[in-house]
Image (spheres, rainbow, N blue to C red):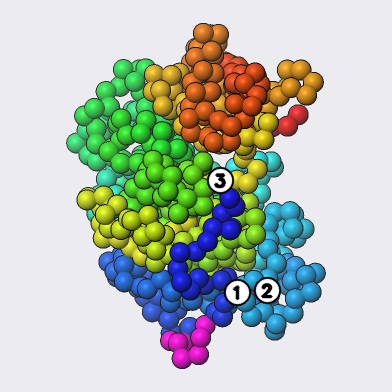
Amino acid sequence: MSVSNVPSATTTPVRSGARAWTPGAVPLFLANRVLHVVSLNYGLLQRFLELMPAAPAEAFSRGRALRTARRAARNVPAYAQHLAQAGIAVDRIRFMSDLPETDKRSYVDRHPLASRCEGGVLPLMGTTIDESSGSTGHPYNWARSVAERRHVRRMIAFFARYTFGDAPRVVLNSFSMGAWATGMTTAAALEKRGLVKATGPDIDKILDTMRELGPGYRYLIVGYPPFLKVLLDEGERRGFDWSPFQMDALLGGEGNSEGLRDYLLRHFTTVFSGYGVTDVEIGLAAETPICIALRRLAAHRADVAEALFGESDRSPMLFQFNPFYHHVETNALGELLFTVARDGTLSPKVRYNPHDEGGVLRDDELRARLATVGIRLEDVAPLSARRLIRMPYLYVFGRKDSTVSVMGANIYPEDIESAIFSEPQSARRILSYQLSVLEEEPGETRPHVAIQLLDEEPDQGFADEIATLLTARLRTFNRDYREAIGEYPELMPFAVSLHRRGEGPFAGADRRIKFRYIAAHP
């Protein structure tokens, strides 16, 4: 079932094209001023987000998004041209649904960077350029102003404080440094949470720092999910004793399964993830304790998954986001559309589609959907969690094209990750994987997983072990696969190939900052 067709459990669902601001409401400029003052203080912002009713928050979000669109139409040459090509006049913009989507192909590739900026000018003073990872093609450049960098840092610091607590700590930032958005921004943001060392993804630097400082501090280690897995494995291989250290993990840059979270929790006290899109900005949303609890519940109860996400075969990541700064919609394909509804954005993003599949649930809508399966949100919340904030929920399945199809069965990278991490002893030997379709005979395809070994020689016995594990796990947890293997028992068992580090399909992977989980087409 498409996420865009999930029926709302609320009696009065609000469509994206609803009126942005109703007569008699608090004037938008005054509300914006109050919001600015509140956002500067952590305690005030948390309390505001705990108390703000969902419906007015959404109306305010739409109002700010429309204001952003109208301003971009007047001041940003590329966006004005984009609207003109769609036959839309600036003075006729009334609803967000009036506006065309933007994405890399339809907008970014067609207009130079400067023309996508306010006034058609790329300022040289106070501007930085972030580069996307290039994991899905050539890298892109994204211009950021001082004001938007300051805002992003403030929101990352807010979520870090809300999830990890008030106590200062030693922060080891292992994100790749340099032009990439996440590394530098995260390092600067977390300076408010303690002592920060930006090590980059350097295992020696992290272990040396922890040896020198010792276990007397609480550590927050920040990085890409697979790198933190490799960090733990390599530390164990070198004889590093993790047990005396109190550590939390903040993941970002890509999704993670609950299997990987459990694997990391062997040594980390808590593991939270953030969600961002370099095309839009990092720090768009973050996991909170209630998000993780709901995701785990949905993974074990199909009725909960169906009620919240419209399907039970996949387990999306679940986050909360600040609707006053980001307006999020979905299109007819179930893809997420982002509008940065905030002043100070140098290159405005209006209904930007990164082609992530997912959906949005207001706090009251989520509670109503849970009620249909007899659950109260407060009963799901962990006992140690802080008071619930009423921010809307964002669920993300991943990139729309991150799947392979074999005999009508859709297989996702998360299926493979969950299977691998269900066996920790096997997971320790694996650095990464790529999912593809293998055609051994003309017209006869089967699912194939290439495995990059961490530090050993390929062993056919281990390949057979992983193939058996993948086949068994997907037969249990992926309904498409279960039906397909019943119909095509000879073609659906997994084929697995093992490769030394940096060889075969993984050659050149060290030049990318993220792993590629779907094999590139030849």
Q: Would you say residue 259 sits in the magenta stretch?
A: no
Name of the residue lying farthest toward the front: 487
Residue occupied by mark 1: 17
**Residue 436 location in percent, x, y?**
65, 28
Label 2 SS: helix
Q: Mark 2–mark 3 contact, CB under 8 Å?
A: no
User: Which residue sits furthest left?
Assistant: 216
Considering only order in the chain, which callout, 3 or 2, is on the residue closer to the N terminus? 2
Q: Main secondary structure of the magenta part?
A: loop
Labels 1 and 3: the sequence-earlier one: 1
Front residue of 426/29: it is 426
- Amino acid carrying label 2: it is Asp
Give the position of the C terminus as an image quadrant: top right
Residue that numbered label 2 is attached to:
98
Residue 489 spot, x, y in % from top left: 62, 21
The magenta segment is 21-27
